[in-house]
Image (cartoon, rainbow, N blue to C red):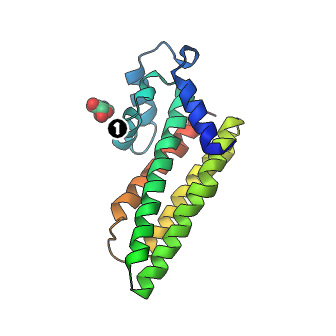
Amino acid sequence: MSPLLLLSLILGSLATPSLSISEDKEDFIQETCKKTRYFALCNSSLRSDPRSSNADLKGLVWISIEILHEKVSDTLFFIIGLYKNTRDPELSRFYGSCIEDYGTSVRRLLPEAVKALGSKDYATAKNDATAVTSYIDACDQQFAEKTPFSDRNIIVHDLSLVASTIIGLLG
Ligand SMILES: *[C@@H]1O[C@H](CO)[C@@H](O)[C@H](O)[C@H]1NC(C)=O
């Protein structure tokens, strides 16, 4: 089974009553996000998924990884589009290296994090999420000026730190 299929199955099971806890969920999301460096982003992105209102900490971790995966994939396709359309050899090289950084995150790091979470190997999952941050930083730091995806890099960077921080709360 592919890690992403596994992820969607696990997320699908979040709606089951066994995973819901009795305390106020709105406060629980807030409380969790306060422990991250990016409260507003954490709060708004987790709440963009309706399952978060019913999720425990583990559920929030899965949701944060899914949101991160979505943003990383979107940005990867966006950069591939730029890469195909540039004739500037330097930009072409920079974009190409970003495609590798984002590609590594989508193909290796995030599926590995999902697998590690499934086997309660939280340290590995956290390392993978943190590694995504480094890869996206490496992509971003090549450019002296703002790129058409600088803002996306920032969001992916921040979301990966949110995910790794929440994973760290699992123990
Ligand atoms: C958290 O996000 C929700 C929905 O986006 C928003 O209504 C709420 O005000 C936010 N909470 C805080 C404390 O910013």
Of residues 161 and 98, the one nearer the viewer is 98
- Mark 1, Cα crowd under 10 Å, few <14 / some 14-19 / many 20+, is few
Check the image and report above or below for 169 versus 106: above
User: Where is residue 7, by image quadrant?
Assistant: top right
Instruction: Report helix, strand or loop for mark 1.
Output: helix
Q: Quadrant of the C terminus?
A: top right
Q: Residue at x 57, y 39 (%)?
A: 167
In what quadrant does ligand 1 lie?
A: top left
Q: Mark 1 vs ligand 1: CB under 8 Å? A: yes
Quarter of the rendering containing residue 46:
top left
Residue at x 52% of width, y 17% of height: 20
- Picture layout, residue 24 above or below residue 156: above
Quick check: can you spot residue 124? yes
* Closest to the observer, 157 or 86: 86
Residue 161, horizontal then vertical, whole percent: 49, 49
Q: Residue at image x 44%, y 87%?
A: 89
Instruction: Count all numbered tags in the image, as a single digit.
Output: 1
Residue 2, image x, y percentages: 66, 45
In the image, is residue 92 above or below residue 130? below
Q: Give the residue furthest to the top.
A: 22
Kind of residue indicated by mark 1: Ser
- Disc 1: which residue: 44
Q: Quadrant of the N terminus?
A: top right
Residue found at x 54% / y 28%? 12
Q: Pinpoint residue 114: horizontal percent, then vertical percent.
A: 63, 43
Give the left or right position of residue 58, taking residue 142 as reference: right
